[in-house]
């Protein structure tokens, strides 16, 4: 199926962001594992894998629309040197992704690509849940203190 005007370019921008956050989350997860925060490592690693699934879906949609996925481009990977820095960097990426996806939904509506629009709407829901989780973690740190928060991250949930 031939893509509507600008949709493949839009999907490649989204793919760039997905590939960037996969790397950012993966490294944050490995750092948490190295620090002994097993629970946090597990959660962030799962998010990295979830972003891989999103990237796969975007690649499939680009190919379906007879486009070429650009796998060579990455955005800036922001690596936090502490857990709060990691959470904040991840929150920035998630919020930027929501803006990009929302712009994409608008564009797809304008050009009449309702299949891609639906895919992007589902992705926004997922990003919103990530934002909620990250904001909750940062609020917990403010309320109970960093040391108490981190002590809860040592063991993975059963």
Image (cartoon, rainbow, N blue to C red):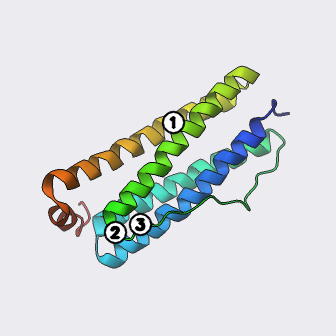
Residue at screen point 46% across, 67% down: 79
User: Is there any visible trace of residue 123 in the rendered image?
Assistant: no
User: Badge 1 is on which residue?
Assistant: 124
Give the mark, 1 or 2, whose residue is nearer the N terminus. Answer: 2
Q: Considering the numbered disc 3 on the image, is that residue within a helix, a strand or a loop?
A: loop
User: Badge 2 is on which residue?
Assistant: 82
Residue at screen point 36% across, 78% down: 34
Contact, mark 1 vs mark 2 (Cβ under 8 Å):
no
What is the distance, in whole Å, between disc 3 and disc 2 at their CAs? 5 Å
Residue at screen point 54% across, 59% down: 22
User: Is there any visible trace of residue 34 in the rendered image?
Assistant: yes
What is the distance, in whole Å, between disc 3 and disc 1 at their CAs? 24 Å
State the mark number for residue 95: none
Asked whether, in this view, residue 47 is left or right of residue 34, the answer is right
Give the mark, 3 or 1, whose residue is nearer the N terminus. Answer: 3
Looking at the rendered image, the quarter that the N terminus falls into is top right
Label 1 vs label 2, nearer the camera: 2
Residue at screen point 55% across, 64% down: 23
| 155 or 20: nearer the viewer | 20
What is the distance, in whole Å, between disc 1 and disc 2 at their CAs? 27 Å
Contact, mark 3 vs mark 2 (Cβ under 8 Å):
yes
| 150 or 59: nearer the viewer | 150
Which percent across, then down, holds residue 115?
Answer: 68, 28
User: Badge 3 is on which residue?
Assistant: 80
């Amino acid at each position: 199926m031939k893509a509507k005007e600008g949709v493949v370019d839009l999907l490649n921008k989204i793919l760039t962001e997905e590939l960037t956050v996969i790397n950012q989350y993966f490294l944050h997860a490995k750092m948490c594992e190295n620090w002994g925060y097993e629970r946090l490592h597990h959660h962030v690693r799962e998010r990295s894998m979830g972003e891989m699934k999103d990237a796969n879906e975007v690649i499939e949609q680009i190919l379906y629309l007879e486009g070429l996925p650009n796998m060579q481009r990455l955005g800036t990977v922001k690596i936090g040197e502490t857990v709060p820095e990691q959470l904040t960097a991840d929150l920035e990426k998630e919020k930027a992704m929501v803006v990009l996806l929302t712009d994409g939904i608008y564009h797809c509506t304008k050009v009449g690509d309702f299949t891609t629009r639906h895919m992007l709407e589902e992705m926004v829901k997922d990003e919103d849940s990530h934002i909620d989780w990250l904001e909750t973690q940062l609020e917990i740190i403010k309320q109970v203190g960093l040391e108490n928060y981190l002590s809860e991250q040592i063991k993975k949930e059963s």
